[in-house]
């Protein structure tokens, strides 16, 4: 899985009446251009063989229906797989924000924080995990080489220090019970997985102890 970095961009313009936009510095227009321009970081700065995401998830203003706001806050996160990509995304985002704000005569602040590290399994721990999963679920239901995901997980920090691996236990297929993904108001944990998950960990422990670790 990928790293996750969070960002906060504050655009400081000058508010004005909606009927007199020429008297202010429109933070809405400035922020809107930034939202669109940030998508070029991935599309035009990352090698197409690499993977990354820049997502603006909050657009907050201090305006009202008939007043153009003087301040806008943009929040969101980015995902990537390597420190080099993290650094590139942060650098390009900072340059885009500064350039667009300068072009509109707005001030700004840009905060970029590193939250979760990439999750990278240890090769030597993969085979024991697959063997236990296969015993519990059958080989047809086990994928030992699934495609990388741009979601993130703090388990990556543990794997930097302790050998191990991260695995998924499927909650259900789309259209079936349990098939609704996380971060969805209709998500419902599949309670039937509790027994299978417990059997997996018990099997893994039994096999590893039997093999002398």
Image (tube, rainbow, N blue to C red):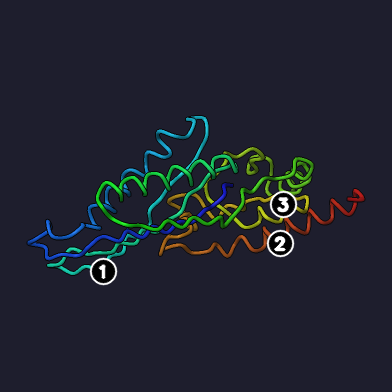
Q: Nearer the viewer, mark 2 or mark 3?
A: 3
Q: Which residue is mark 1?
A: 62
Q: CA distance from mark 2 to mark 1?
A: 50 Å
Q: CA distance from mark 1 to mark 3?
A: 43 Å
Mark closer to the chain start, 2 or 1: 1
Q: Residues within 10 Å of mark 1 (few under 14, many from 20)?
A: few
For image coordinates 34% across by 62% down, the residue present is 73
- Local crowd size for mark 2, using a 10 Å CA cut-off: few (<14), some (14–19), many (≥20): few
Numbered disc 1: secondary structure? loop
Q: In x, y percent, where is residue 111?
A: 46, 58
Q: Nearer the viewer, mark 1 or mark 3?
A: 1
Residue at x 92% of width, y 50% of height: 212
> What residue is pinned by disc 3?
159
Along the line of sight, which residue is nearer the eye, 164 or 26?
26
- Are the residues at dot 2 and dot 1 in contact (C-beta closer than 8 Å)? no
Q: Nearer the viewer, residue 73 or 142?
A: 73
Q: Report the disc number at residue 198.
A: 2
- CA gap between label 2 and label 3 equals 22 Å
């Amino acid at each position: 899985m990928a790293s996750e970095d969070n960002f906060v961009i504050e655009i400081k313009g000058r508010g004005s009446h909606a009927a007199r936009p020429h008297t202010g510095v429109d933070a809405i227009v400035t922020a809107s251009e930034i939202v669109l321009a940030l998508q070029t970081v991935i599309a035009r700065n990352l090698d197409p063989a690499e993977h990354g995401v820049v997502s603006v998830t909050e657009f907050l203003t201090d305006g009202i229906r008939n007043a153009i706001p003087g301040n806008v806050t943009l929040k969101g996160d980015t995902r990537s797989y390597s420190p080099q990509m993290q650094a590139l995304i942060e650098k390009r985002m900072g340059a885009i924000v500064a350039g667009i704000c300068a072009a509109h005569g707005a001030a700004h602040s840009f905060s970029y924080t590193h939250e979760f590290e990439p999750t990278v399994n240890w090769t030597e721990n993969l085979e024991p995990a697959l063997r236990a999963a296969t015993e519990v679920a059958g080989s047809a239901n086990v994928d030992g080489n699934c495609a990388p995901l741009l979601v993130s997980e703090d388990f990556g920090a543990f794997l930097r220090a302790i050998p191990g691996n991260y695995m998924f236990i499927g909650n259900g297929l789309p259209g079936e019970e349990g098939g609704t993904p996380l971060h969805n108001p209709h998500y419902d944990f599949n309670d039937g997985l509790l027994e299978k998950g417990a059997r997996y960990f018990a099997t893994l422990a039994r096999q590893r102890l039997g093999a002398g670790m």
